[in-house]
Amino acid sequence: MKFYFAVLVPWILSVACEAEPLLQQGNLDDWSSYTILGESQYEPIMDMEQGVVIRASSENSASGYRFFSPIDLSVTPILQWQWTAQQLPFFMEMSNQGIEEKITEFDETQSEGDDFVLRMVVGKQALFGDAKTLQYVWSGNQSIGAHWAPNRNSRVLVVSGEAQVKMQWQTLSRNIQADWQAMFDEEIQSVDFIAFMTDSDAIKGAAIGYYGDIQTLRKDQLSAIQ
């Protein structure tokens, strides 16, 4: 993968206040940018439903933001975030009739199609070499629950997409420990960073998505809001 360092549910304010906030109301002060190719654009905007969110747009680019701080999964194993897609990754191609067509179907499981409108990443930093990462994605071509290994240090898990309504906010909650165990067959007690990225560099195309608040939760806090 490209990282070289590594159900809609209601929003309840009282629970969020007990959680460990990582990103709130589009404030990226505690996040650092990273670039793989080009510069995807991340702009705080006002959303009538969610307040301030991050609009992410990519044009043949792959860059994102990373929250680099250890997260103790024995305390807060749940990662919860909000996102929605506007434009799934696409590229333009000339047909045999000489007409330019928008192409949205490509193989995301291969390096030449490894682009996602929304990508949330949890990772463990290695002393030497690449980080190990688990990537939650909104897929335009794979079914929810599909997963694959781009390389020995990365796993991709589809958590959104598959005929879900675009421009409709989702709140997703994932148990990082359980998912890591399922994807890597490895028990972990912490992760070193959280990252998000909207990219379209593999297909040399474009994509637009939105990220809302991101936080970690205890297991009992997740039960309280479901």
Image (cartoon, rainbow, N blue to C red):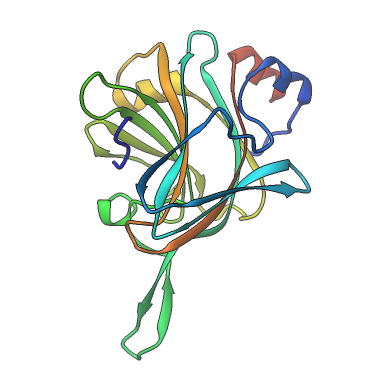
Say which quadrant the C terminus sits in.
top right
Residue under the point 59% across and 33% down: 81
Q: Is residue 28 visible?
A: yes
How many numbered callouts? 0
Of 28 and 135, nearer the camera is: 28
Image position of 201 (left or right of 207):
left
Across and down, in percent, residue 213 comes to 64, 34
Q: Is residue 96 above or below residue 176?
A: below
Say which quadrant the N terminus sits in.
top left
Residue under the point 21% across and 27% down: 129
Q: Is residue 89 visible?
A: no
Q: Is residue 201 above or below residue 68?
A: below
* Quadrant in which residue 151 is drawn: top left
Task: Looking at this view, name the residue that lies furthest to the top.
Answer: 74
Image position of 70 (left or right of 87):
left
Residue under the point 55% across and 14% down: 76
Across and down, in percent, residue 88 comes to 50, 59
* Quadrant in which residue 4 is drawn: top left
Across and down, in percent, residue 141 comes to 41, 56
Image position of 20 (left or right of 175):
right
Q: Is residue 197 above or below residue 215?
A: below
Across and down, in percent, residue 13 comes to 77, 25
Of 39 and 2, nearer the camera is: 39
